Amino acid sequence: MSSGLSALSCFIIKFTLGKVQQRVPVVLSREEVSRVISALQGQYKLIAQILYGSGLRLSECLRLRVMMVDLSRLSLTVFSGNDGKDRVTVLPETVVSAISQQIHHVKLLHQQDIVMGYGGVYMPPALSRKYPKERYELKWQYLFPSTRIRHGYPYYSTIAGA
């Protein structure tokens, strides 16, 4: 028995795990952030201002809908954020006029889309069944809509009327 254990012991390899390096986040100074934002234009500048001023993640910002913006309370409501929870965050006063212009722009685009037979947006399936016409309401439109229709879109046939 002892000869069997000694034979096994020659196959045991000793090793140590390498240390995992911590990633240190890159933090820009206020002046650097100001220079970056001032170099941007149009909706990209507004998106950057919202990200910086509200603390939103990029995906949360791009999923904002018109109804999630409360200009009177200076707040944004984020549904099912990165952690799966809903939350309300601040809206910087400096972007109120730009967001008002963006909402007006979305309204004009939405009106054009309705005339062309489009204008519906994705809604969660349960809400879509409960409120089938809500997808055509302005409040459900994305604050930063796509400039093109994707043909792989799961609800394309219902939106395009095909």
Image: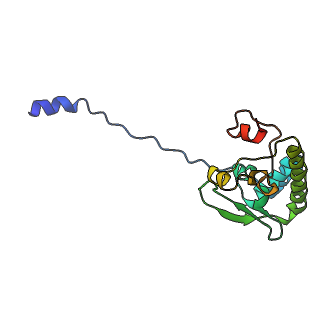
Residue 103 spot, x, y in % from top left: 86, 56
Residue 13 spot, x, y in % from top left: 30, 33
Residue 75 spot, x, y in % from top left: 77, 66
Check the image and report above or below for 15 versus 137: above
Q: Is residue 15 visible?
A: yes
Q: Is residue 29 visible?
A: no
Q: In front: 89, or 1? A: 89
Rendered-image quadrant of the N terminus? top left
Residue that sits furthest to the bottom in the current view: 73
Total numbered circles: 0
Residue at image location 10% in from the left, 34% down from the top? 2
The scheme the figure's colours follow is rainbow
Rendered-image quadrant of the C terminus? top right
Q: In front: 112, or 55? A: 112
Q: Determine whether, in the image, residue 68 is placed left or right of residue 45.
A: left
Check the image and report above or below for 14 versus 133: above
Q: In front: 159, or 72? A: 159
Q: In front: 154, or 142? A: 154
Residue at image location 71% in from the left, 52% down from the top? 132
Residue 106 spot, x, y in % from top left: 86, 51
Residue that sits furthest to the left in the current view: 1
Corner quadrant of residue 83 = bottom right
